[in-house]
Amino acid sequence: MAIRLSEAMSALGGSLNRTALADIAIANPGEGWVSLPHLAEYLVQEFRAAGGEVIEHAGRACVLTADGRATGVRSEHRGEFNADRILVACGPWTPDVVAPLGVHIPNGSPVSMLVTCTPQQKEVKVVMNMPRAAIRPNPGNTLAVDHDWYEEDIVEHTDGQYSIDEAVVGQLMAEAGHLVGDGRPLTAASWKIGLKPIPGDGEPVAGELLRVPGCFVAFTHSGATLALILGEILAEEMLCGTRHPMLATFRPERFHA
């Protein structure tokens, strides 16, 4: 909904730089954020408490099949694991994992960057998406900052690593700092560069591969907002064999119509 900024500033607190914002803005009261490392740690603890086993550093994996059906996975460093149903959820590498099965999923994953700033004096409680910077709260009274205008400045090296000119990071921090406090540039504490998982048509890909029964996929960008519901729906499908109607338009076979 569109509201006048003067009506919302008191609710948003004094952390925002009012001069950087238009008088009319779009407010999403339900917009939130989550620290993915903390969420992942919590889910892993729940998984282990339920009797699950987490195997780390297994390396690249491929899907094993027999008679056209998935029978498990083979890992680069930890050997084979047999299962009557498997889930391929390998982020931007998901299309590469299912390609040997004769399944094509377009991959639109760009190389992007996320920057974490140093702790702020005033707590920022809102998520902001602006033309030159997107910010969200982060643990330790820090902010996570990103956007897409600098993606062409990221350099990929022959060893698969990425780098970017620190001046570009500084420019992003200046854009983000203009949105909060007194408008001074933020100071970058760290930044990470990698592939942002996005299917070729921009929509989530979730469900069983019709060409390879027993093999399910989950490939989407909005992991923080969709991971929990997708996990619940896919677990139900894998256990019960009933296709959930909420996944009707997101199934991988849409690319083979």
Image (cartoon, rainbow, N blue to C red):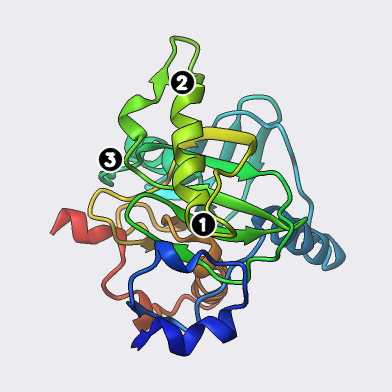
Q: Looking at the image, which is closer to me, 247 or 220?
A: 220
Say whether residue 112 is visible: yes
- Going by the image, does 128 lie left or right of 104? right
> In the image, residue 229 lies at what x, y percent?
53, 75
Crowding near pointer 2: few (<14 within 10 Å), some, many (20+)? few
Residue under label 3, please give it.
102
Residue drawn at x 31%, y 67% as measured from the top left: 250
Q: Relative to residue 156, is residue 202 depicted above or below?
A: below
In this rendering, is residue 196 above or below 123? above
SS of the residue at dot 3? Answer: loop
Tag on residue 135?
A: 1
Question: As drawn, which residue projects farthest toward the left?
Answer: 257
Neighbor class of circle 3 (other Cα within 10 Å; few <14, some 14-19, many 20+) is: few
Q: Quadrant of residue 81?
A: top right
The quarter in which the N terminus is drawn is bottom left
Which residue is drawn at the image coordinates 41% and 56% (left, top)? Answer: 220
Q: Does the CB distance between marks 3 and 1 fall below 8 Å?
A: no
Of callouts 3 and 1, the N-terminal one = 3
Q: Is residue 89 visible?
A: no
For badge 2, the amino acid type reads: Asp
Nearer the observer, disc 2 or disc 3?
A: 2
| Mark 3 residue type | Gly
SS class, disc 2: loop
Q: Kindly report which numbered mark, 3 or 1, lies closer to the viewer in this rendering.
A: 1
The location of residue 129, given as percent across then percent down, is 41, 62
